Structure formats: C-alpha cells, structure tokens
Image (cartoon, helix red, strand yellow):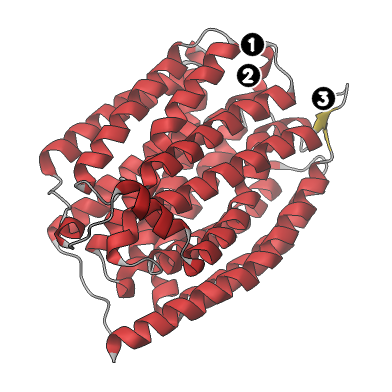
Amino acid sequence: MKPKKFSGYQVFVIAILTILQFSIILDFMVLSPLGPMLRPALHISPAQFGMVVAAYAFSAGLSGLLAAGFADKYDRKKLLLFFYTGFIIGTLFCGLAPTYPLLLAARIFTGIFGGVIGSVTFAIVTDLFPIEVRGRVMGFLQMAFASSQVLGLPVGLYFAEKWGWHSPFIMIVMVSVLVAVAILFFLKPIDAHLKIKTDRNAFTHLFKTISNSTYLKTFAATTLLATGGFMMMPFGADFGVNNLKLTLKQLPTLYMITGIASMILGPLIGRLSDAWGKYRAFVVGSMLMIFIVIIYCNLGPTPLWMVVGINIVMFAGISARMISSQALISAVPEQMDRGAFMSLNSSTQQISGGIASYIAGMIVVQAPSGELLHYDTLGYVVAGSIIITIAMIWFVNQYVAAKLHKAHL
C-alpha cells in the first residue's frame, strides 16, 4: 500500500515540532560534552555534575505530574507556548549562571517548564496524525536528536571553546525565540479534545488516569526505557576523552558524523516501523543495543573511526527503540486522557531518568589518571533494563493491537 502523503500544513506541523524538540533536546544534551570543560571551571566532581543533569530531570518529572490534571483542559497550542516561554527564560538563566549553585537552580527552573513540552508535543502528534503514519512522524521527530548532534553539539562546542561554556545556552535561546514566534502566528488551535463532554475536574482527571491499570503498565515500561540513555549520556564525553583517548577537538567530528547518519536513519526507521510492525522494530533495535552497549562500555583507547562506527550502530538501535515505542505508546490513551497520559508518561521518563543519572554519578568515579572507572558496570545495567523492556513493551503492543482491532469492527 502506497504511504499516505502529508498535507502542506501537516508538513509544517512536523517541521516546527521537530525544530522545537531540537531546542529542548539540545538544551539537555549540550551539558554532556561540556562536562570536560564545565567541571574544572566550576570545580565540581562527577557526582555533582551528575546532580546537575539529574536536577533538570527531577524538576521536569515533578512539573509533569502537577500539570497532568490540567493537560486536557486547554488548547494544546496555548499550553505549548506557555511552557516553551518558561523554558526559554530558564535556558537564558543557565547562560548567565556564574556558579555551580546558580547553574543548579537554573537547571531546576528550566526543567519545570521544559519537561512538560515533550508530552504536549506527543499529544499534538497523536491528535493530528493517525496511528498508520505515526511511525513516520515519530521518525521525523527523532531527527531532532540527530540534528542536535549534527548542528547543535558541534556549534555549541565551538561556541564554548571560543566564548566559554555559557555561550551554547545563549545560542539555544536565540533559536527558541524564533520557534516560539512561528508557533504563535502559524500553528492552528488544537482543541478537539475540549469538545468531548466531561465533568471531571483536574484532580479527578489526574486520579482516573493514574489509577488506570493499562496506563500504569505503560508507565512501568517507560520507566525502564529511560534508564539506558540517562545512565550513559551524562558521562559520554568524559568517557570518550579520558578512556577512549579522543581529543576535545575530535568530539565535534564524532557528534557530527553520528548525527548525519542518525538524520538519515530516523525517517527510514520510522517508515519501516509502520510497514514492518512497531514491536518488531523495537525488538530488533533492542537486541542491537544490548550487543553494542556491552562492547562500547568495555572499550579502552580506541581510534576515532572505530568510535564513530560503533556510535552510528548504537544510535540506530536507540532510534529503532524510541520511534517504535513512542508510536505504540501514543496509541494507548483515549482521546480525552491524551494530555494527562502524555504528561504523566513524560514525568515517569524524566523522574526515572533523573534517578538513573544520579545513580550513574554514584557508580562512576574518576581515577587520579583522569580515567572513568566502572563505566562497564553502567553498560551491564543498561543491557539488563533493555531485556526487561522487550517483555514489557510486548504487553503494550498486545493492548494496542486489541484496541485497533476493536475500533475496526
């Protein structure tokens, strides 16, 4: 069957949401490669740096929980603009923070607003695109991760080397302001969910969503889905520099080549997940991840070309897992619960990711020589969590398949 073509407006929605996700993801991801530069500048330990990463995740998770009951009470466009404005202000604070305590406070503030945006974005995608093409849409949104590597991280690192570690945050603010203006003037109201009659107040709505057993199973799966990325990401650059013996000047090359490959692979994997089956794509991506993560986390000094090759395969596995699982999970909630469900799901992801980042900071220690110790332990923990999620996402897939079958009867 020939894939359905997107309308001009749908293409705009996909593009603007992808760029928006790019700014959010870059704001989070840019901290990792700044680690070798930021930690000496602020005189902080790996554990303190892990806390900076975790602080964003914890505050994002908490704000998502608080916002969940109200997520289906407003036009999603207005909700998106409100939280995105707060995110821009918080990122500006990060760019101006002169000390560790102020940076920590700025990350908490940014997380309060930034953590809700992803859930609103996925609710918009679920409202505007049917399940049959949602893998393709998620594939394009996944390009935000790759774009942040190709465009954001190399440029951010260049800015940081030239003007200091604060400058990448200022760059993100400039991009985000342009995105906010485009959303304000060109995105149409998204309020179909408001037409569904319900007498639930915000707190009743939140309780009903939390107490739904199917939703709870999905949140449990999301908890473990978040473990992998959040555990390895905060110390990725440090591991590359101190253990793999890459230079700081080689990091932009690594991120750029890996990102270009991911930009190409994202839409292809999205299309494949729609045609081949989302759960099958998830399993293949998961098995690939288990294999490559164990190899990667046990590496010593490694030439750049080999690190690049391993990273490309790793990100192919990550993309397959994220695109297929997000498309599946988006089909779980009923329309009247979408905003609350997505918000709670995002909170679950952020909080579990925050815990994972904090634990990673406690596991990883830096030897006097500069090398990170026990990074291999992180690899085994991540591999174990991936095995469990394969089983948990199977239950989500069974529920979605039964739901779609019932809808077509």
Residue 37 disc label: 2
The residue positioned 49% from the left and 46% from the top of the image is: 347
Residue 335: in sight, yes or no?
Answer: yes
Mark-to-mark CA distance, 1 and 2: 6 Å
Mark-to-mark CA distance, 3 and 2: 14 Å
Query: What secondary structure is marked by label 3?
Result: loop
The residue positioned 59% from the left and 57% from the top of the image is: 225
Left or right: 397 with respect to 2? right
Is 124 above or below relative to 286? above
Q: Residue furthest top?
A: 98
- Residue, disc 3: 370
**Percent position of residue 137, x then y:** 33, 61
Asked if the residue under mark 1 is in contact with the one under mark 3, i.e. CB atoms within 8 Å, the reply is no
First along the sequence among labels 3 and 1: 1
Residue 214 disc label: none
The residue positioned 46% from the left and 49% from the top of the image is: 346
Amino acid carrying label 1: it is: Ala
Q: Give the position of the C terminus as an image quadrant.
A: bottom left
Left or right: 50 with respect to 69? right
> Image quarter for residue 239?
top right
Is 60 above or below relative to 398? above
Amino acid carrying label 3: it is: Gly
> Image quarter for residue 351?
top right
In this view, the residue in front, 213 or 112, is 213
First along the sequence among labels 3 and 2: 2
The residue positioned 49% from the left and 11% from the top of the image is: 97
